[in-house]
Image: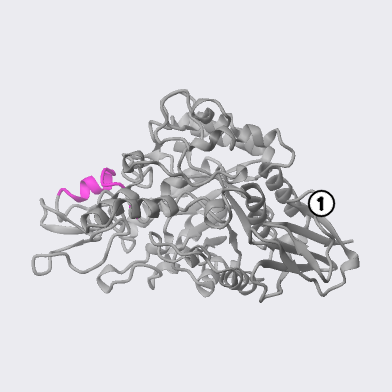
């Protein structure tokens, strides 16, 4: 595989609304991000991925775009955006934009025009259908609840929306629409961005009248066309969000010979927790199988993304670790396991300081449209409120969207005003300032892992081998490249755990650990709760 600059890079995702507010209106903004670039530089990341900052009425917090060529008023101006790109570049940091092209806002000019008449030139930019027996054309469901079809009274037709009814789906079969998307992408590329994260990109090949939502037959044709007309001419990073991808599909996206994307976000490890709103405890053996499968099957024929959480998922230390007694240890352990694998790691804002899920007392404290819709639907069926709230505490998207915890001052230093979403009460002791002042903090452990990747080709290009597959407490694996070998050993429990390495222990030296006095690698060793150790040969 040809070496690419983003193979050694680490990406830091910023959810702008919740990152840093520069003007006291309670909403994070671009100037706030600029003010924290030195913090991001200190962490050692090379790329920041911005969740959408385009003009939007905010039916879905920016994922409903009304103008791809303008900036949301709450976030600032295009001049601020240009400044962010330039200031980040001065620090050796690229800016990756969130590309939302499966759908637009219903307030986008295209849809406003499309609604005017059935023969409007923009009508075919979206997907319409006559009623069938006086009802929706079929049983497709919106991810946010209810039907995926919304009736338009003026024209007497339904339009498709796989998300909110204010997010009509684009019709990618329309070549004129596709060209306008490519023109827009080139506009941002010419501004100097580092690449794109592509929201629900697997849906652009949908065939709704055949009940095909994801991975439609034209999907990869569209992606190759996109590549040819936009980023394929530049050395950019591109990643597609692909909830339905398996390893074979991921190879289609990320095999360099196919000229589609750099990599794909897949969620098989996240889906081990079962139904989103009725999650179950994950099984470590299943996690090992899934993570190992992706490491082995994409080796030398594709590229992995490495992530635990993002703006749509609960906080990693709450979902996969222990956000109580062993919060620091388990957060470091989870980071160690992931960052020593092959692929490009993604850190979601606050992950590097161990931010946790939140338990707001009332549904009125929540903002997320998906959460609110789910609550209404389940209340309507007579389900007890406390049961529904437990689902929200475990899985709601606002877990990841509470304001970034910068320090222990009022509102965690996020804003001088009233924050758009409540701050997690634990900000007084979980915050970036205290982490930076503590040499043994989660922040500095992430910094060490990022540096370790940059300085060791074995982590970037080495092969992968699972160790002690049947151990029900320890996830351990080996990476090898040329004459270099790395062994990663992680205890996934709050108990002591036994582990034994069958290779030559005498040449393996401890180089990273989440405890100050971790044991040497041996045939018989005991790991403390959530202990993680990385060994490398001389």
Magenta-colored stretch includes residue 105:
yes
The 10 Å Cα crowd at callout 1, few under 14, some 14 to 19, many 20 or more, is few
Q: Quadrant of the C terminus?
A: bottom right
Residue placed most toward the observer, 14 or 127: 14
Residue 49 percent across, percent down from the top left? 53, 46
Q: Is residue 190 left or right of residue 536?
A: left
Q: Quadrant of residue 530?
A: bottom right
Q: Please say which color scheme the image uses.
A: one colour
In the depicted structure, whether residue 300 falls above or below residue 145: below
Magenta-colored stretch includes residue 401:
no
Residue visible at 61% across and 74% down in the picture: 297
Res. 485 in view:
yes
Residue visible at 68% across and 62% down in the picture: 491
The residue pinned by badge 1 equals 517
Residue 209 percent across, percent down from the top left? 25, 71
Q: How many marks?
A: 1
Residue placed most toward the observer, 304 or 426: 426
Residue visible at 82% across and 75% down in the picture: 502
* Magenta stretch in the rendered image: 103-116
Residue visible at 50% across and 52% down in the picture: 197
In the depicted structure, whether residue 403 falls above or below residue 25: below
Residue placed most toward the observer, 312 or 493: 493
Label 1, secondary structure: give it: loop
Residue 495 percent across, percent down from the top left? 66, 61
């Amino acid at each position: 595989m040809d070496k690419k600059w983003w193979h050694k890079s680490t990406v830091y995702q910023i959810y702008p609304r919740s990152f840093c507010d520069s003007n006291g209106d309670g909403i994070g903004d671009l100037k706030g991000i600029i003010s924290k670039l030195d913090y991001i530089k200190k962490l050692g990341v090379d790329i920041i991925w911005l969740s959408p900052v385009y003009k939007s009425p905010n039916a879905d917090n920016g994922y409903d775009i009304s103008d791809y060529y303008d900036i949301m008023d709450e976030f600032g101006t295009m001049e601020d955006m240009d400044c962010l790109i330039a200031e980040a570049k001065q620090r050796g940091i690229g800016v990756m934009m969130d590309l939302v092209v499966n759908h637009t806002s219903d307030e986008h000019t295209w849809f406003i025009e499309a609604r005017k008449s059935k023969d409007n030139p923009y009508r075919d930019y979206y997907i319409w259908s006559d009623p069938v027996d006086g009802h929706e054309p079929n049983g497709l469901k919106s991810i946010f609840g209810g039907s995926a079809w919304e009736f338009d009274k003026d024209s007497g037709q339904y339009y498709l929306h796989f998300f909110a009814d204010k997010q009509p789906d684009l019709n990618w079969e329309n070549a004129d629409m596709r060209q306008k998307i490519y023109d827009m992408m080139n506009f941002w590329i010419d501004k100097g961005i580092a690449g794109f994260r592509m929201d629900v990109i697997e849906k652009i090949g949908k065939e709704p009248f055949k009940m095909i939502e994801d991975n439609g037959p034209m999907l990869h044709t569209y992606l190759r066309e996109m590549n040819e007309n936009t980023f394929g001419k530049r050395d950019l990073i591109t990643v597609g969000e692909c909830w339905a991808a398996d390893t074979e599909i991921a190879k289609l996206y990320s095999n360099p010979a196919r000229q589609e994307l750099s990599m794909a976000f897949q969620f098989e490890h996240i889906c081990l927790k079962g139904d989103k709103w009725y999650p179950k405890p994950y099984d470590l053996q299943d996690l090992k199988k899934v993570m190992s499968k992706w490491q082995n099957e994409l080796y030398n024929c594709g590229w992995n993304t490495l992530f635990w959480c993002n703006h749509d998922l609960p906080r990693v230390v709450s979902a996969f670790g222990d956000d109580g007694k062993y919060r620091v240890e388990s957060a470091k352990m989870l980071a160690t396991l992931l960052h020593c694998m092959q692929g490009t790691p993604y850190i979601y804002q606050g992950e590097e300081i161990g931010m946790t899920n939140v338990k707001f007392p009332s549904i009125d404290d929540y903002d997320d449209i998906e959460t609110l819709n789910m609550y209404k639907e389940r209340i309507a069926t007579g389900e007890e409120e406390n049961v529904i709230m437990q689902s929200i505490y475990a899985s709601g998207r606002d877990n990841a969207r509470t304001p970034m915890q910068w320090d222990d001052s009022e509102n965690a230093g996020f804003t001088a005003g009233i924050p758009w979403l409540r701050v997690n009460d634990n900000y007084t002791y979980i915050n970036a300032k205290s982490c930076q002042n503590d040499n043994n903090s989660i922040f500095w452990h992430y910094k060490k892992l990022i540096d370790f990747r940059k300085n060791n080709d074995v982590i970037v290009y080495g092969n992968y081998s699972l160790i002690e597959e049947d151990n029900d407490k320890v996830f351990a694996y080996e990476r090898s490249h040329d004459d270099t070998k790395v062994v990663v050993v992680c205890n996934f429990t709050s108990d002591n755990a036994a582990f034994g390495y069958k290779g030559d222990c005498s040449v393996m030296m401890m180089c990273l650990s989440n405890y100050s006095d971790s044991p040497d690698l041996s045939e018989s060793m005991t790991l403390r709760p959530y202990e993680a150790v990385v060994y490398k040969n001389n």
